[in-house]
Image: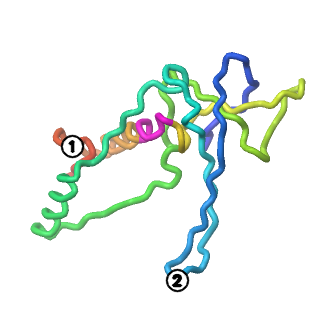
Amino acid sequence: MEAWDVVNREPDMNVIKLTWAFKCKRYPDGLIKKFKAKFCARGDMQLEGVDFFETYAPVVQWTTICLMLILEVLLDLKSKQGDITCAFLHANFDKNEKVYVEMPRGFEQYDKRGKPRILKLRKTLYGLRQSPRAFWEYLTEKFKACGIKQSSLDPCLFIRG
């Protein structure tokens, strides 16, 4: 997904550590469905004004959820839900954000002098403070491109047709 570039480490860079998050997905009867691994950044190591600037992302209002469920029942509407695979990896950083992370354990690379190389992120990762906001902006932009309008009453409500 072209999520990063491998670069040499410079002394003035704030390099964030990474962690692996492992999960075992199971079927309802308990049998193993699949094993998952997620590459996560340590957002607690980010510096405001250096690695991130804006973090706010809206959350749907509970009244909106209740209203939509009521309308669905009264008007015999159908609702749908979806899941976006690797959601945060779809969003890009703002132009002025430069985020550097260590290479994941087991995948290290070294420069000619034997110093470890690092990753300059091009896409947001789970764990970064600005990732939810960046994904929200990405999603809103895609909805608008499809002709789906954002409500002025609740920014998490989108309407089509």
The stretch in magenta equals 129-135
Picture layout, residue 159 above or below residue 11: below
Residue type, label 1: Asp
Residues tagged 2 and 1 counted as in contact (Cβ below 8 A): no
Helix, strand or loop at disc 1? loop
Percent from the top left, x then y, of residue 3?
61, 39
Which mark's residue is nearer the viewer, 2 or 1?
2
Q: Looking at the image, which is closer to me, 154 or 61?
A: 61
Percent from the top left, x then y, of residue 125?
55, 41
Percent from the top left, x then y, of residue 32?
61, 75
Q: Which residue is mark 2?
A: 29
Q: Which residue is mark 1?
A: 154
Helix, strand or loop at disc 2? loop
Percent from the top left, x then y, of residue 68?
18, 59
**Display colour scheme:** rainbow
Residue visible at 41% across and 28% down? 54
Q: Main secondary structure of the magenta part?
A: helix
